[in-house]
Image (cartoon, rainbow, N blue to C red):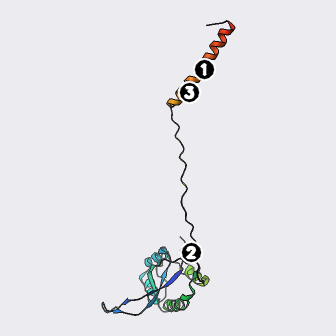
Amino acid sequence: MVLEYDFDIVVNEELEDDAGSERLDISVARARFRHVKTAGALRAASPKIRKIFQEAGFDLDSTDSNMTHGFYPPRDGTERERILRALFTNIRELGISGEYCGEFDFHRFIDDLKKAKPRAGMQRHVPDWTPKPRKATPAKPERRTVPGRIGFALGLAVILFAVLRYLAETGSAP
């Protein structure tokens, strides 16, 4: 399965403090993957991999975005760079060798990061697909239907009547 590793920056208005239920009124920018399957692949990775991403600023949830694959909003550039720097710092410090990544592919993730470009106003183009209904093939009955039987009988009667009339005209009547 090929995953798309595009992500968007989402700003959370409130953040719950780790010490208790005290809420801090600061805005925190977090990165969320656009696709549910990619976020699910990250959730299925080892706890160390999840910790590396979460400490860098990634959420394990997905976001509903209309951006096209390979592009991100230009306004997200600075936060995106900050989160990616923190991610690569965490990877260098903690290391990922030998950790279970599951379907999450770091090489494809890095390739998608390199190819991503800022683009304003690009909407995702997903055509509405509706399956075409199949035409039902009529089942052929083993026996003839009633109208078919009547038609066959009338045709046979006309032929028989024409043969008898011909024989009567020629003088050889049965």
Circle 2: residue type: Arg
Residue 171 picture quarter: top right
Q: Which residue is mark 1?
A: 158
Quadrant containing the C terminus is top right
- Residue at 56%, 26% in the rendered image: 152
User: In the image shown, does 72 or 158 lie closer to the viewer?
Assistant: 158
Q: Which residue is mark 3?
A: 151
- Residue at 49%, 88% in the rendered image: 95
Q: Which residue is mark 2?
A: 124
Q: Earlier in the sequence, mark 1 or mark 2?
A: 2
Circle 3: residue type: Gly
How far across and down, in percent of the image, does residue 16 sit? 35, 89
Q: Are marks 1 and 3 in contact (CB under 8 Å)?
A: no
Q: Nearer the viewer, mark 2 or mark 3?
A: 3
Q: Residues within 10 Å of mark 3 (few under 14, many from 20)?
A: few
How far across and down, in percent of the image, does residue 57 sit? 46, 88
Answer with left or right where residue 21 lies relative to residue 3.
left
- Residue at 56%, 70% in the rendered image: 126
Q: Earlier in the sequence, mark 2 or mark 3?
A: 2
Circle 1: residue type: Val
Q: Earlier in the sequence, mark 1 or mark 3?
A: 3
Residue 47 picture quarter: bottom left
User: In the image shown, does 32 or 109 lie closer to the viewer?
Assistant: 32
Is 22 located above or below residue 143 in the figure?
Answer: below
Number of numbered discs visible in the structure rendering? 3
